[in-house]
């Protein structure tokens, strides 16, 4: 028989980390695209200052998040798998529009479907580190005149700025996809509510 029960999906730290990271990345994008010249709102000088300040906050947050992932073992949730991946893809392309059931059962111990695992793994292991690294190279080049120690030295700012800007566009694309997929849980707002309150009503098969 299928019943529903309230399950604690996200801990307090996880929610704090998720929302703080969201605010900082949006703010970094907002100030970053002003630095890029896409619009003028804060003024170039302040945009640079705030972009740099938010960077330090994000790095502190990431340091705590890395510690949390490894001490709690939650990192295992993000290990990519091919199991059920085509069923999940088919669900997003077709099933969702036909009211088909979700192909992956969500539990507190396995809260991500295979596509989420892949997307978040890519974000955490490739995209965010690439953004951070290109941003730091950009920063050191800017403020230390390119005089970086040995292996870190970059010949010119152009390629670094290009990589950093490409990362910013990729993060913006991720955010748009993330916001759409957020609405595809068991109800339109159930994923959002879970990330706000920590609790979600999940199927309990007995
Ligand atoms: C996390 C670490 C980050 C660091 C260390 C960093 C650092 C920097 C630095 C130093 C600059 C140049 C500022 C100047 O002209 O002095 C810059 C520009 C920029 N940043 Fe970041 N940033 C980071 C994250 C982000 C994120 C998350 C985004 C987007 C979501 C972003 C988007 C941009 C953009 C679009 C530019 C303008 C690039 C250009 O046109 O040359 N940054 N960043």
Image (tube, rainbow, N blue to C red):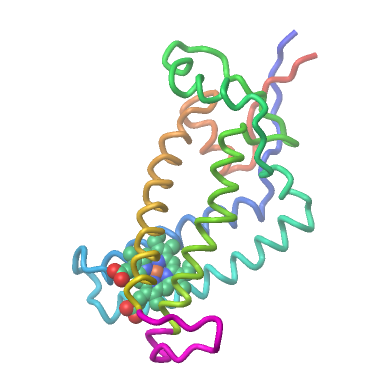
**Which quadrant of the figure contains the C terminus?**
top right
- Boundaries of the magenta span: 141-156
**Which quadrant of the figure contains the N terminus?**
top right
Q: Quadrant of ligand 1?
A: bottom left
101 lies above or below 80: above
Percent coordinates x, y for residue 128 in the rendering = 52, 59
Quarter assignment of residue 69: bottom right
164 lies above or below 118: below
Q: Is residue 175 left or right of residue 13?
A: left
Residue 27 can be seen in this image = no
Percent coordinates x, y for residue 180 in the rendering = 41, 35
Q: Residue at x 51, y 20 (%)?
A: 91
Q: Would you say residue 146 sits in the magenta stretch?
A: yes
Camera-side residue of 196 and 184: 184
Q: Residue at x 37, y 51 (%)?
A: 172
Camera-side residue of 79 and 95: 79
Q: Residue at x 41, y 59 (%)?
A: 167
Residue 176 can be seen in this image = yes
Quarter assignment of residue 85: top right
Percent coordinates x, y for residue 20 in the rendering = 52, 59
């Amino acid at each position: 028989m299928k019943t529903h029960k309230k399950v604690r999906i996200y801990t307090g730290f996880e929610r704090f980390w998720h929302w703080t990271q969201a605010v900082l990345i949006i703010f970094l994008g907002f100030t970053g695209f002003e630095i890029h010249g896409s619009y003028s709102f804060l003024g170039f000088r302040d945009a640079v200052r705030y972009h740099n300040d938010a960077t330090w906050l994000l790095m502190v947050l990431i340091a705590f998040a890395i510690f949390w992932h490894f001490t709690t073992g939650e990192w295992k949730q993000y290990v990519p798998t091919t199991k059920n991946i085509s069923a999940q893809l088919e669900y997003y392309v077709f099933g969702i529009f036909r009211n088909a059931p979700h192909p992956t059962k969500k539990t507190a111990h396995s809260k991500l479907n295979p596509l989420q695992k892949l997307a978040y793994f890519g974000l955490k292991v490739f995209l965010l580190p690439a953004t951070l690294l290109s941003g730091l190279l950009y920063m050191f080049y800017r403020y230390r005149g390119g005089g970086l120690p040995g292996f870190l030295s970059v010949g010119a700012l152009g390629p670094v700025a290009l990589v950093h800007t490409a990362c910013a566009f990729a993060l913006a694309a991720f955010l748009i996809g993330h916001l759409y997929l957020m609405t595809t849980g068991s109800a339109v707002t159930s994923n959002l509510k879970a990330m706000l309150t920590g609790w979600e009503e999940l199927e309990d098969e007995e």
